[in-house]
Image (tube, grey):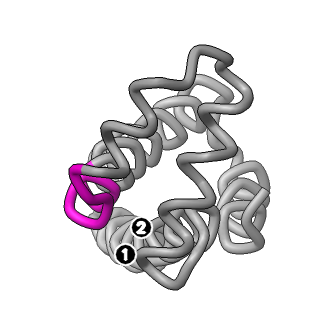
Amino acid sequence: MNDSLKKLLQILKDEGESDKSIAVVLESITGIVTPTLFQDMATVLTEEDIQLLDTIKDEQEFQEKVKSLYSQRSGKSPEDLINEITDKFVEGFLARYHQDKQAALAQPVVK
């Protein structure tokens, strides 16, 4: 697991967020990472790469070849891209989370 994601999960737990709330955050990250990764792969892999991948029937071999081709074409691994996206998400999320917490604390309590 990415270090910034570990930090985010720990902060949310320490702040008393529910498991359901934490699951929503994780779903949001997945919803951003997955399409971004596929989009980047689509722009990096060549038509010849796609044709080669189409010939591979074994799922594990296919995944390994995708990672290899992506790394060759982009200069980074899919894991590196996932970490970059996750780090940016966590940074933005935590900034907004802390702003919202501060704003909530500044609101007067109505009895």
Check disc 2 and give the amino acid type.
Phe
Point out the stretch of residues depicted in magenta: 39-47
Judge whether residue 44 is colored magenta: yes
Residue 69 position in % (x across, y down): 52, 60
- The quadrant in which residue 63 appears is top right
Mark 2 packing: few (<14 Cα in 10 Å), some, or many (20+)?
Answer: some
**Mark 1, residues whose alpha carbon is within 10 Å: few (<14), some, or many (≥20)?**
few
Is residue 14 found left or right of 30 in the rendered image? Answer: right
Task: Please tell me the numbered disc located at residue 92.
Answer: 1
Residue nearest the observer in this picture, 75 or 95: 75
SS label for mark 2: helix
As measured in the structure, the alpha-carbon distance from the residue carrying label 2 to the one carrying label 1 is 5 Å
Does 55 sit above or below residue 17? above
Residue 37 in percent (x, y) is at: 38, 54
Task: Identify which residue is drawn at 67% across, 17% down.
Answer: 58
Q: Quadrant of the C terminus?
A: top left
Q: Which mark is residue 89?
A: 2
The rendered magenta stretch, by its main secondary structure, is classed as helix
Image location of residue 14, percent across then percent down: 78, 57
Query: Looking at the image, do the residues carrying marks 2 and 1 touch, with CB atoms under 8 Å apart?
Result: yes
Identified at 71% across, 63% down, the residue is 11
40 or 16: which is nearer to us? 40
Q: Residue 20 carries which label?
A: none
